[in-house]
Image (cartoon, rainbow, N blue to C red):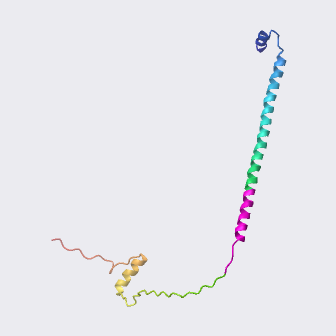
Amino acid sequence: MVGCVLSALVGVVVNPWVLFGLAVAWAASVGGSFFYGQDVGKDSEIAGQAKIKQAIEDTREKAQQGAASAIAEIKIVNTTIHQKAETVVRTERVYTDCRHAPGMRDTINSAITGRPEPVGDGKLPAAQPAK
């Protein structure tokens, strides 16, 4: 079919093997262009990474030089300071005379520990008669 179309356009009968050869050559050129483009892309990526790495190393070197020069400029000075000492007196009240009854002491201790103990025998008072 392709041969007929080309023969109508050109006026010459085209051999199908020539068309197949042209198609193979075209596919090979497209494939070669793909692999060439990939190789060029790899090279440009490697070059870009090398630039970034070099910039990082340059920055690190400059930072180290700046820190070293700043440390070298530090001057150590020993100074003796003579000054009166200030005395601060704090007073806090301590209630040593605070005493509780034994029953109240048990109530406070049960509140602190969180384990309440029953009051008295643990029995409720009797109910009052209704009026």
Q: Answer left or right for 92 relative to 84.
A: left
The spot of residue 54 in percent (x, y) is 76, 53
The span picked out in magenta is 57-77
**3 to 87, vertically: above or below:** above
Q: Quadrant of the N terminus?
A: top right
Residue situated in front as seen by the camera: 4 or 110? 4
Q: Which residue occupies 29% across, 76% down?
A: 124
Q: Which residue occupies 69% across, 75% down?
A: 75
**Residue 101 lies in what quarter of the image?**
bottom left
The spot of residue 102 in percent (x, y) is 36, 87
Q: Which residue occupies 84% across, 15% down?
A: 15
Residue situated in front as seen by the camera: 108 or 115? 108
**Residue 16 lies in what quarter of the image?**
top right
Q: Answer left or right for 96 relative to 5.
A: left
**Residue 64 lies in what quarter of the image?**
bottom right
The spot of residue 118 in percent (x, y) is 35, 78
For the stretch drawn in magenta, the main secondary structure is helix
Is residue 69 inside the magenta stretch?
yes
The spot of residue 23 in percent (x, y) is 80, 23
Q: Which residue occupies 70% across, 70% down?
A: 71
**18 to 83, vertically: above or below:** above
